[in-house]
Image: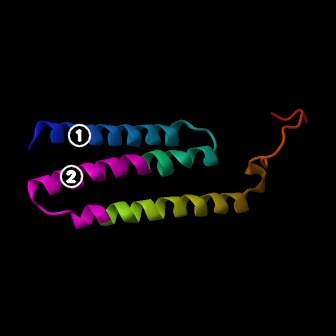
Amino acid sequence: MSMALEILLSVLLLVGSGFVLVGSFGLVKLSDFFKRLHGPTKATTLGVGCILLGSIGYHAWAGDGLGLREVLITLFLFITAPISAHLMSLAALKLDPGQRPRAPGPATDDGKD
């Protein structure tokens, strides 16, 4: 394996691990459900995507083929993560209307912050 490919795959794995770590901290540290929802859906999706790209690159270089499993996992993850986050946020909005975020629009000075 060439040194450049090893460095590229290592960078993909490190960046992916960093995204997963940041997404996990976001899940634990953020206060509100709607804020915590972004950690696993956004950062972790990017992290697992980078890790899977590294795995696909390694197996393609090693001569094991494209790695159909990794491609299918990546497609499934990128399709299901936004949909599940959207459905969880809709369910949370319907269960507790007091938790709804303020509607976007012009800022008003009504004393609520």
Q: Amino acid at mark 1?
A: Leu
Seen in the picture, residue 5 relative to 89 is either above or below; the reply is above
- Contact between labelled residues 1 and 2, with CB atoms less than 8 Å apart: yes
Where is residue 71 shown, x and y percent of the image? 29, 63
Question: What's the residue at 39%, 43% (across, down)?
Answer: 20
Residue bearing the label numbered 2: 57
Residue bearing the label numbered 1: 8
- The dot on residue 88 is none
Q: Residues within 10 Å of mark 1 (few under 14, many from 20)?
A: few
Whether 62 is among the magenta residues is yes
Placement of the C terminus among the 4 image quadrants = top right
Where is residue 31 shown, x and y percent of the image? 61, 39
Magenta region, residue range: 45-71
- Way the structure is coloured: rainbow
Where is residue 87 shown, x and y percent of the image? 59, 64
Q: Residues within 10 Å of mark 2 (few under 14, many from 20)?
A: some
Question: What's the residue at 43%, 51% (across, down)?
Answer: 45
